[in-house]
Image (tube, grey):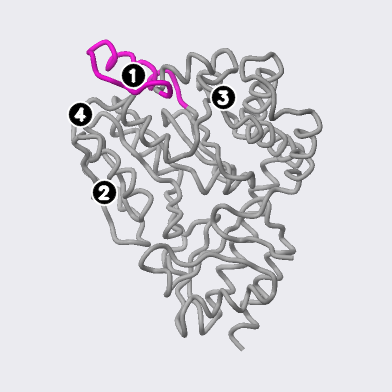
Amino acid sequence: MKIYLTPGPSENYFVVEEAIKEALQKKITAISHRSREFKTIFEHTTNQLRELLEIPSDFAIAFTGSANEIWERILQSCVEKESFHLINGSFSNKFYEFAQKLNLNPSKYEVDFSKGFDLENINIPNSTELIALIQNETSSGVQFAVENIAKIREKNKGKLIVVDAVSSLPYTNIDFSVIDSVYFSVQKGFGVPAGLGVWVYNQKMLDKAKDLQSKGKSIGTYHSLLELDKYAQNNQTPETPNVLAIFVLGKVIEAMNKKGIAMIRRETDYKAELLYHTLEQSEFLSPLVKEKSQRSKTVIVANVEKGISSDVIAFLEKKGIIIGKGYGSFKDSQIRIANFPTHSKELMEQVADFLIEYGK
């Protein structure tokens, strides 16, 4: 049997199979998204998420098709002219490219792949309306410390701050007092089959969208922020959503709440430390990110010092472990290993042993 440690999609959380069976038995996939039953599912999932991430009551939650879609909705609904993007990998750069394709005027602060950001060198223009931060760059395995988000906020109190936590939630402890929005997709840290994006946003985001709309700017159609929010306030979606994924996500988060977010975070720290230590001791592999404080705890990226990544991948696959290639142009020289709540301590200890064995 194969176990997936790919950085998304990844191994399903342990309750997913039973949740899908329950959904099919109850014919959840056939219900109307205007029904009382769906409203109950929507409310259960969002309430469980509020509990898990300690989301304040003045933040709302909406569902989309993916996190990539949320990039577009953020830009259409909340940026009139100019956004600012921190870029240190492929996904943060794609968000910037979305702004360009929407004929906005984005600016950026970009560092080399696998590098972190020096806050002293970040100059955000006064004309910036929205700052796009990537808390965890999935392509390069670099994390942006949550305390640095507060430092960005301190110098930019009048600007919207949106946070990409696609591959770090639920591990990352977001301080909602210093952001306006955070978003993720479910196939990574939550271990749910792909096909659902989750968008958390506050009133400032809605006010910006209303302001742009009042000026005659198009802010999107059925999935504009205002449209999504209108339905979300009634535990609904504008159109028929991925009802199965919303139901399963609710069951997964319920199980996570029973375990406790503190335990999930402690286990994630332990597993990350174990893997990085193993890489540091290897002659064949080494951590890509050299600065320890900037290393992602949920996506561990390693350089392959001898041979190519497919050698390591093939070796682990024979052991039943599936890991990811390096992203894009780094596919032959790097590997990526997911460290999500679905991956147990025992599994990671076994992976560490396999990596040691590979070097012998």
- Tell whether label 4 touches label 3 (CB within 8 Å): no
Which corner quadrant of the image does residue 170 belong to?
Answer: top right
Using a 10 Å C-alpha cutoff, classify the residue at mark 1 as few (fewer than 14 neighbours), some (14 to 19) or many (20 or more): many
Whether 341 is among the magenta residues is no
* Front-lying residue, 201 or 236: 236
For the residues carrying marks 3 and 4, which lies nearer the camera in this image? Answer: 3
For the residues labelled 3 and 1, the Cα–Cα distance comes to 23 Å
For the residues labelled 2 and 4, the Cα–Cα distance comes to 25 Å
Q: Position of residue 75 (x, y in %)?
A: 32, 31
- Chain-order first, disc 2 or disc 3: 2
Task: Give, as a three-letter code, the residue at label 4.
Answer: Lys
Label 2 SS: helix
Q: Which residue is mark 3?
A: 240
Taking 72 as reference, is 9 above or below it? below
Using a 10 Å C-alpha cutoff, classify the residue at mark 3 as few (fewer than 14 neighbours), some (14 to 19) or many (20 or more): few
For the residues carrying marks 2 and 3, which lies nearer the camera in this image? Answer: 3
Which residue is painted at 23% across and 40% down in the image?
A: 100
- Chain-order first, disc 3 or disc 1: 1
* Front-lying residue, 117 or 336: 336
Which residue is painted at 27% across and 10% down in the image?
A: 214
Taking 303 as reference, is 51 above or below it? above
Q: Which residues are magenta?
A: 201-223
For the residues labelled 3 and 4, the Cα–Cα distance comes to 32 Å
Task: Give, as a three-letter code, the residue at label 2.
Answer: Glu
Using a 10 Å C-alpha cutoff, classify the residue at mark 2 as few (fewer than 14 neighbours), some (14 to 19) or many (20 or more): few
Q: Which residue is mark 1?
A: 209
Task: Give, as a three-letter code, the residue at label 3.
Answer: Thr
Q: Residue furthest front?
A: 30
Label 1 SS: helix
- Chain-order first, disc 1 or disc 4: 4
Label 3 SS: loop
